[in-house]
Amino acid sequence: MAGPDASSQKSASRRVAVLLPYPLGPYDYSVPADMELAVGDYVRVPLGPREILGVVWGEGLGEVAATKMKPIAGRFDAPPMPEAHRRFIDWVAAYTLSTPGTVMRMSLTAPKALEPPRATIAFGRGALSPDLNLTPARRRVLDVLEERGFGTAAELAEAAGCGVQVVRGLADAGALETVMLPPRYPASVFEQLNDGPTLSRDQAMATEKLKAKLGQGYSATLLDGVTGAGKTEVYFEAIAANIAAGRQTLVLLPEIALSAQLIDRFAKRFGTVPALWHSDVGPAGRRMTWRGVAEGKTKVVVGARSALFLPYPDLGLIVVDEEHEAAFKQEDGVIYHARDMAVARGHLDKFPVILVSATPSLESVVNAEAGRYERLFLPARHAGATLPKIGLIDMRRDRPPPRRFLSPVLTQAVTDALAAGEQALLFLNRRGYAPLTLCRTCGHRMQCPNCTAWLVEHRFQGLLRCHHCDHAEPIPSNCPQCDNAGSFAACGPGIERISDEVNALFPDARISLLASDMFQGFGSRGMALQEAIRQVRDHEVDIVIGTQIIAKGHHFPMLTLVGVVDADLGLTGGDLRASERTYQLLNQVAGRAGRAERPGRVLLQTYMPEHRVMQALADDQRDAFLQVESEERRAAAMPPFARLAALIVSGPDMAEVGHVARNLAQAAPRGDGMVVLGPAPAPLSMLRGLHRERLLLKTRRDVPVQQVLATWLGKVGVPGNVRVQVDIDPYSFL
């Protein structure tokens, strides 16, 4: 599709193909005689009555008569989208069976960055008038300038401990001169590279191997190590070497919550903070990061999966931290797995990719065993810390008191930890107060009006909330079915309910409740969470009650006890990866205990102590557990030893959705090494007001899945109010 770069041509008859951020192919536009264009340039083009943003994707396709072509309206003064990035967009579109325009739209989420950034207004020393009233605050501002030379009003005010108006008053009086500074792109200057901690022998060996791969083409390395082994310090060394070589680095994290502690460690090591890219970054920050990346000046980005689609001109390394996390899977819009796309990006552009985990995914383990990835293993915790002992509490024998959820064994362990001046973490991966609210009188269950899901009680907020569509409503005083007052019963615990129990058991303890929905608010969530984490780290908290947000990446020196309230949560439901995910999560949360001098202890409350996940955790038999998982998947011909692809049919009309799903089933591909399952209503048969049915294609690994799917979908007409989504390598089966 993309033709040769012909930017020197100025003929009015020249046409170019422009890719638009819509589910369309490139459209031909004519190039005005006085406009120079190169492939990759960002342009404004007419589409109907509007002008929209597009990218020159190559020479014109010649499918539109010259008399019907519209001219390009303008070109943005921005670096062109790099050829490597355009190639990546085309590859992702082909792999996910999406249109290139839909994929490209993920690269255009900061359109204001296409306008050149304005210079920063700063101040330097000016002439002091003899009659100028030099208040103490003004003197402090001048003293700061004497040391720094210049600074913005906000910077000077903060350093001098005064208000911005003091700085502006000095400027109005002529005591300060205006200085126009060039744009300050994040993570563009690394003036102070501090030495990291002394590395162990295993860390040093891993570091040298990773550094040797930089600039040597594509490679994929699985950096595997127990929790607390210092994996972050190892890949920091690779980042430092990549910075020294002048190349850009991307660090992918599965959750925003993990960025706060990583940023703090990064700043101590590199003397500055990395550029951030995730949903809580405001418009100004996104604009500067996007532009800094596009100009090649921002050297390190730490971000969520969408950071993959920034237009890096010189990307030399990708690190995927916690590579096993399901949060790397994008489930809406273009459905993709960021870990797999990161590996593809490295392969396409010939640079190394590092996958980091204490509990690697079975996919990555199999790739390492097959020689597709190199595996580097860190077997011991850093600085002499030891791994915690994991014990199982059989809830069939050690039952909690009525209407309680903490067993006597776990309660006593918390008591002992507090008596020793240590901290305890109680983990339950369930937000809110209770997962189900029902009427004691008539049995009515409070259900989401938009989804086939129960409403979760959030008692502290006074709301019932759906965790799928975010529908929320006040907790009613009367049952909507039988109108009885005060008849609601909370079924099962969420962390708010555990908090009530802990407050009753330990009234003098300082308790912190940590869940993702407690840190809402644009731009503020990251700071609030960072402060909460700091309080735990500085031992301003005795007992932490948390969900997955607290399970990984954090280092709390005084936290010696981890109690998992419901270790069985996640083992039911028939998910292909249920056992693997449960093992990973419990192993990660167990890793929060005993990370410093004091030894740690972990207690798992379970009704299935004989389950292989519980036994593997208690006996520290991770590799044996993965071996059994691998053998079972191979025997069942399931990933990673086979391929899966899902078709999700959805729409507002149940009958039409069912009709399309049945037509797809009738047109399903048949052949050696292929089987189609379904259609069947999805477990969440209604989601956000749409009815849903699923079909699942299962094939051998050598079957060209995308080709099979494209042929299959081409046989079935789909009405406009029905949508068919393709999920290659599905992770969720809801």
Image (cartoon, rainbow, N blue to C red):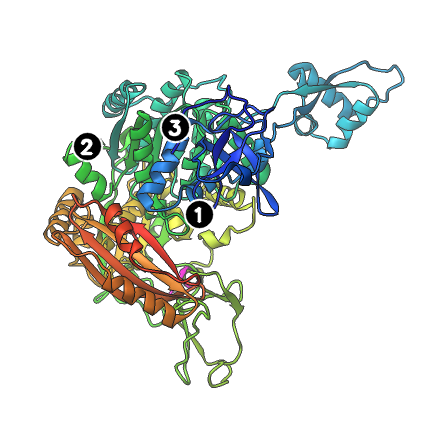
Q: Viewer-proximal residue, 292 or 606?
A: 292
Which residue is denoted by mark 1 in the rendering? Answer: 23
- Residue 480 appears at what percent x and percent y? 49, 80
Q: Nearer the viewer, mark 1 or mark 3?
A: 1
Q: How many numbered discs, if any? A: 3
Few, some or many C-alpha atoms within 10 Å of disc 2 (few <14, some 14-19, many ≥20)? Answer: some
Which residue is denoted by mark 3 in the rendering? Answer: 84
Marks 2/3 in contact by CB < 8 Å: the verdict is: no
Q: Is residue 494 magenta?
A: yes
Which residue is denoted by mark 2 in the rendering? Answer: 372
- Residue 8 appears at what percent x and percent y? 51, 19
In the picture, which quadrant includes the C terminus? bottom left
From the viewer's perspective, tell me whether residue 348 is left or right of residue 631. right
The image quarter in which residue 158 lies: top right
Mark identifier at residue 599? none
Residue extending furthest toward the right: 131
Task: State how far apart marks 1 and 3 are (Cα).
Answer: 21 Å
Give whichever of discs 1 and 2 has the lower sequence position. Answer: 1
Marks 1/3 in contact by CB < 8 Å: the verdict is: no
Residue 419 visible in the snapshot: no
Few, some or many C-alpha atoms within 10 Å of disc 1 (few <14, some 14-19, many ≥20)? Answer: some
Magenta: predominant secondary structure element? Answer: helix
Q: Which residues are magenta?
A: 493-497
Q: Viewer-proximal residue, 217 or 267?
A: 217
Q: Is residue 217 magenta?
A: no
Find numbered disc 1 in the image and state the secondary structure of the residue it sits on. Answer: loop
